[in-house]
Image (tube, helix red, strand yellow):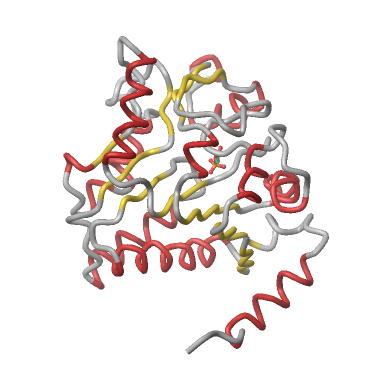
Amino acid sequence: MQIIVSEGYEELCKAAAKVVAKTINSKPNAVLGLATGSTPLALYKELIRMHKEDGLDFSQVTTFNLDEYVGLPKTHYQSYHYFMHENLFKHINVPQQNIYIPSGTTDNYEAFCDWYERRIKECGGVDLQVLGIGSDGHIAFNEPSSSLGSRTRIKTLARQTIQDNARFFDKIQDVPIYAITMGVGTILEARTIILLASGKGKAPAIAGAIEGPVTSMNTASALQLHPDTIFFLDRDAASELKMIDYYLWIQEKAPSFPRGN
Ligand code: PGA
């Protein structure tokens, strides 16, 4: 895994946006895995800027979102459908028919989850997956104790997650208890993964993910098994990493790493 530490939140998002843009520029019909939450907001802002000012073209891109709350209609102001439309899709040129987000209102969740998994494969698999991380180490809504081989399914949210996300709702009782989420196994099949984290509140989860054992108690730790994952962190999110000096040393020295001709 690669660890890139930036001074602050905006910078880490800009660094991550460069990876997204590079993926699209080298493969115009790339399949992107996308995340919601407060962390990717500045990443999406930068991608919108790149689309408007630099001509970053999403016209052949396909996107699959990680998760959605069960029970919220697409039009609900806290649904992830609404979030993605408002914060990214309505500002770029990704075709509507290329956008996939789990349904929070299907009448057959099992069949929907199977279809979602199949659709990802039919589209060629995810080239680049964007992730945030929960304060309990979750990726997507794979809460502690989720199987590291899990696939898209319904999960019961942890109390901690409900508390963390209550800030987006009028009151905590409005936070849905269930979500439909890609599994850890689904996520690990992405060719490249970028995980973004900012702030001291994420520092213990990040330390567990990067330096702890691989454990379902911190599902982000499963990324240690993935061959091409980049963590984009700010100083606060990186503040509990024991080997931070080494990661900064690598960051400084990597550009002159000897490579073949
Ligand atoms: P956040 O959520 O970006 O709003 O902190 C991250 C997550 O729960 O995955």
In this picture, is 215 found above or below 20?
above
Nearer the observer, 194 or 186: 186
User: Residue 10: horizontal and vertical position, in percent?
Assistant: 51, 63
Judge left or right: residue 214 versus residue 242. Answer: left
Q: Residue at x 69, y 76 (%)?
A: 250
In this picture, is 80 found above or below 52?
above
Query: Extreme front residue here?
Result: 260
Judge left or right: residue 94 versus residue 185. Answer: left
Q: Residue at x 61, y 53 (%)?
A: 198
Please tell me in which quadrant of the rendered image residue 163 appears. Answer: top right
Ligand 1 visible in quadrant: top right
Count of numbered marks = 0
Query: Extreme top residue here?
Result: 107
Q: Quadrant of the N terminus?
A: bottom right
Q: Residue at x 62, y 28 (%)?
A: 147
Nearer the observer, 242 or 188: 188
Query: Extreme right residue here?
Result: 242
User: Residue 74: horizontal and vertical position, in percent?
Assistant: 29, 25
Q: Residue at x 72, y 42 (%)?
A: 214
Judge left or right: residue 184 versus residue 35. Answer: right
User: Residue 170: horizontal and vertical position, in percent?
Assistant: 48, 23
